[in-house]
Amino acid sequence: MKKALTILSIALLFGSLWAQNPDAEYNLIKHHYTLNSDSTIDYNFRKEIKYLRNKAITAYADKGETFILYNPAFETLTINECYTIRPDGTKVETPQNAFINQLPSECTDCGRFNGIREMAIVHTALEINSVVVLDYTIHRKSNILNETLQPQQNCPVKKFEIIVDAPKNENINVQYNKPLQGIQWTMANDTHRYHFVAQNLAQTISESYMPTPEKLYTQVTISNDRVPIHNEALKTIEGADALLNTLKKEKESDYVVAIRDYVIDNINSNNIPLSLLNYEVSPASVTWAANCGTQKDKNLLLRSLLKQAGFSSYFVDESEQTLIVTADGMQQRLSATHKTPIILYGVARDENPSNSVDMEMPLDTIALADGYYMVKLPMGRQNYNPAMLTSERLSPAQVRRCNETDRYTIQLPKGAKLVGDKIEASKKASGIGEVSISIKQKGNTLEIKRNLVIEKDIISVEDYKDFREIIQIWGSYSQVQLVID
């Protein structure tokens, strides 16, 4: 076990070193959207990437290759430029046999998506300090623009641009998130309708317990507020009654969860951008018949099945991640995408929930020698892994607020004595949390008390050292020794 933790620590250390010594860097990334007066859109993408280390060429498919998704049903792909500039300045054009049109892996196991294509480009003449230039345009027979872009990438970016051109009567809505680690950008004063420019961006970070990208990094959402017309009527699905009968439970909440779990487990998920489908959500009957779909397809199917089972429901936000359903006479909240427990809706939740356990545990020993035994101790219910928390950190940590108090008792055989003194360990950090552990013998009983309080969901880099020490104490003392006379 110690060897495994050492290897993990070394891997995390090299992850931090990798952040300081990138394998490649982008000289330029540019996204250019042109909304045409004939209700079509031209999307132009350009990247210029320089290879700094051999690993970028051999180990990463996103560096030595490029994958372009498009839907020939309403999109046309044109490669404008694709070549490599070698370190000596010579230019090598990418040969035709390096352009491979294939079915995206995200579209397998779903026949109705078999028309979507992926252009895989295998870049050639790659060597350290060479630069690949790729420029392509996708012409879309659609007037819907709805894109979210993240300037920071998994290697540094010298210049990142977003450009939008549109007729004067076309509304363009731009939104920015409020990330934990934002970037500086400027708005170019030129003839473009919108021109976002950011320079000298650090690469994204790879660490344990990280916040989601949308919470951590700057993201820009561009939309013209046009949406496809959906027929979202929750119609009866032919053939679904037999399934619903098999899933039926005595308690309504259990029935709702069973339907939710069936959709998650048995309807194949195709993780493809909604832009490839012109942002359309398939009718529930289509998703049911195909047994596959996007997450939004599955969510609409879930609502239809719930209605067919006699439950009213609605989504609480545009992402359709959370569903409110009336069951057992109450409005209840459940995830439409994950098997999280169902909870009451509209009831205030404790931001720092308290939970306690007081229970007797069986004696679990390993015989050593000369009457000595190793006793395995319960470790509590918050399963943070101290080995994943390196001594230095570049990003905030995503954690869970909690107030856990666990008391365990273990009955010892007659004549058993705890080796050494009782164990007492604690730490408190104001505004972050606290931990305390007590392990002692009372007669023929071994008593273990553990308490952990975490006051924040996000631990800043400045608070990380104290948080790490708290978790290190919480994860300690997994065993003690006994001697039996």
Image (cartoon, rainbow, N blue to C red):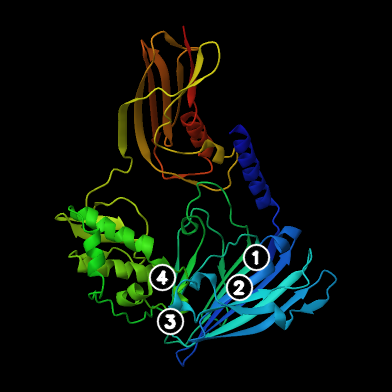
Q: Residue at x 42, y 85 (%)?
A: 170
Q: Earlier in the sequence, mark 4 or mark 3?
A: 3
- Please state the horizontal and vertical placement of residue 372, each as a whole percent of the image: 51, 14
Task: Tell me the tag on residue 294.
Answer: 4
Q: Earlier in the sequence, mark 4 or mark 1?
A: 1
SS label for mark 3: loop
Q: Are marks 2 and 1 in contact (CB under 8 Å)?
A: yes
Judging depth in this view, the residue of 225 and 119 nearest the camera is 119
Q: Is residue 50 visible?
A: yes
Q: Are marks 4 and 3 in contact (CB under 8 Å)?
A: no
Residue at the disc numbered 1: 61
- Gap between marks 2 and 3 measured at Cα: 23 Å
SS label for mark 4: loop
- Gap between marks 2 and 1 measured at Cα: 9 Å
- Please state the horizontal and vertical placement of residue 402, each as a whole percent of the image: 37, 38
Name the kind of residue labelled 1 in the image: Ala
- Gap between marks 4 and 3 measured at Cα: 19 Å
Residue at the disc numbered 3: 144
**Residue 113 vertical position relative to residue 216 in the rendered view, above or below:** below
Name the kind of residue labelled 4 in the image: Thr
**Residue 458 vertical position relative to residue 275 in the rendered view, above or below:** above
Q: Tag 1: Cα neighbours inside 10 Å, few (<14), some, or many (≥20)?
A: few
On the picture, is 206 further left or further right than 314? right
- Gap between marks 4 and 1 measured at Cα: 24 Å
Q: Are marks 4 and 2 in contact (CB under 8 Å)?
A: no
Name the kind of residue labelled 3 in the image: Ile
Q: Earlier in the sequence, mark 2 or mark 1?
A: 1
Q: Earlier in the sequence, mark 4 or mark 2?
A: 2
**Residue 191 vertical position relative to residue 255 in the rendered view, above or below:** below
Residue at the disc numbered 2: 67
